Image (cartoon, rainbow, N blue to C red):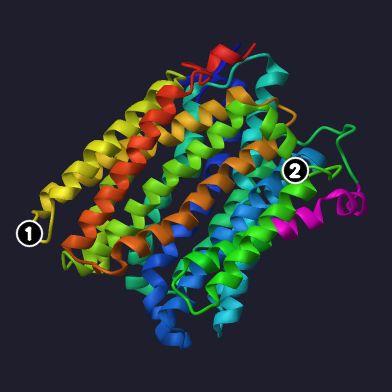
Amino acid sequence: MTADSDPSGEAVPRPFGPRFVAPLLLGSCLNPVNSSMIATALVPIGQELGAGPAEAAALVAVLYLASAVAQPTMGRLAQWCGPRRVFVAGAVLVLVGGVVGASAASLPVLLGARVLLGIGTSAAYPTAMLLIRRRADEHGVEPPGSVLGWLTIAAQTTSALGLPIGGLLVGLWGWRATLLVNIPVAVLCGLMAWSWVPRDPPGPARRRPLQIASELDVLGIALFSAAATALLLVLLPVQRPLPVVAALAVACFGAFVWWERRAREPFVDVRRLVANVGLSRTYLRTGLSYLLTYSVLFGFTQWLQAGRGLSAEQAGLVMLPMMVTSVLVAAAVSRRRLVRAPLLVAALVALAVAGVMRLGGATTPVVLIVVVVAVFGLTMGLVAVGNQAALYVQVSARGMGVAAGLLRTSIYLGAILSSAATGLVFGSAGLTDAGLHRLAELLAVLAAVLVLFTLLDRGLPRRMENERG
């Protein structure tokens, strides 16, 4: 078989050459980058549109919620309609979201644009995983580890890149640039996919639009959305009747599980999750991992500004080495197709970083902070590589679209929980050294749980080949 090269420069079989891989990587970057890029624009948005801090923070939350629901939904649509079609449709939604957001004159319109961006960007990762898995099966080869590694980098570690990008765009052209930048990227991504990704083959999985509407688990999606929204209201520091909202969250979640066990085409196949214990553990481990990493990404960034006295641009630059390290380690480790070892090392590194943070404070030299942030990038890269590799060996090609979407859902549930976690640790102590120390203690507990969780999971394979065949 002739060879080509992927973005890392590694020789790979032509089925996974640059033309096939490039649009998948570019599209998969959009969701994590948009999730964090808005952080540096919240203050100027609030000033221009007359929104308070809690209202402006909703711009972050709505993308999390839209993504948590849309990721598995897009995966299911990809299995029914074809991944290439859904990928391109997602790019169109991103284009529309960018136009609406960049021209928004009120907060509700901007919130609607963020919902469109959440839905549109959610199409890329599950369709990319499905396209890669199907292409591997069609050609009778395993996808090169570097291809999966770069997809991991694009979809799961680029969130740290959103902070410096957002700070630069806001500084140069204002907050609307953080929405406007989606337009050319969406156009380029859609054109590349349309031109370079092979057409979806016709087959029995194709559905007509009316059939899709009737078979899509609308009630399950609505119950999941209601439960996630109620959970977010419980966790966010906003005025609400807490006991009522908490009871609503529990009731919606219970109704969701009850309905999904009976639905003919469930939004989340609860029965399959119960049967596939390894996959359920992967989702739980992913959620815990990103509860830890997002707590650092947003909690530590806040302390850098309020506790250490750095500007937003300086804080973004200080966090940039985390992105660099995560990219380098993910690219290197993914080629070895390892599963268990990266997850264990990631948890141990996080435990060590938490110990160093516990000793830090406002007088800690910036150079040492940069080193600690860079080291934590190892955790970000390794949890992304390990959990994606675990998913790949635990799911068949038929279910890959929905399973990959649910992996992203678990990431965003971890992100939502991190907002509550950082609120708790900084709530009484403020963004001070005492608050930083509480954050470090929380990180240490989470890292220790992940160490034990990984060691005790005897069903977790050491390498990807262990369960493929």
Q: Please identify, in this view, whether the residue under mark 1 or under mark 2 is nearer the observer.
A: 1
Residue plotted at (92% across, 49% down)? 211
Residue in the foreground of this view, choosing between 463 and 176: 463
Provide residue 367's location: percent of width, then percent of height: 11, 49
> Where does label 2 land, which residue?
76
Q: Secondary structure at mark 2?
A: helix
83 relative to 345 in the view: left or right: right
Q: What type is the residue that disc 2 sits on? A: Arg
Cα distance between the residues tagged 1 and 2 = 51 Å
> Where does label 1 land, which residue?
363
Residue in the foreground of this view, choosing between 329 and 278: 278
Q: Residue reaching furthest bottom?
A: 50
Q: Is residue 60 above or below residue 357?
A: below
Q: What type is the residue that disc 1 sits on? A: Thr
Q: Is residue 180 visible?
A: no
Provide residue 107's location: percent of width, then percent of height: 54, 81
Quadrant of the rendered image containing residue 202: top right
Q: Secondary structure at mark 1?
A: loop
Q: Is residue 111 above or below residue 190?
A: below
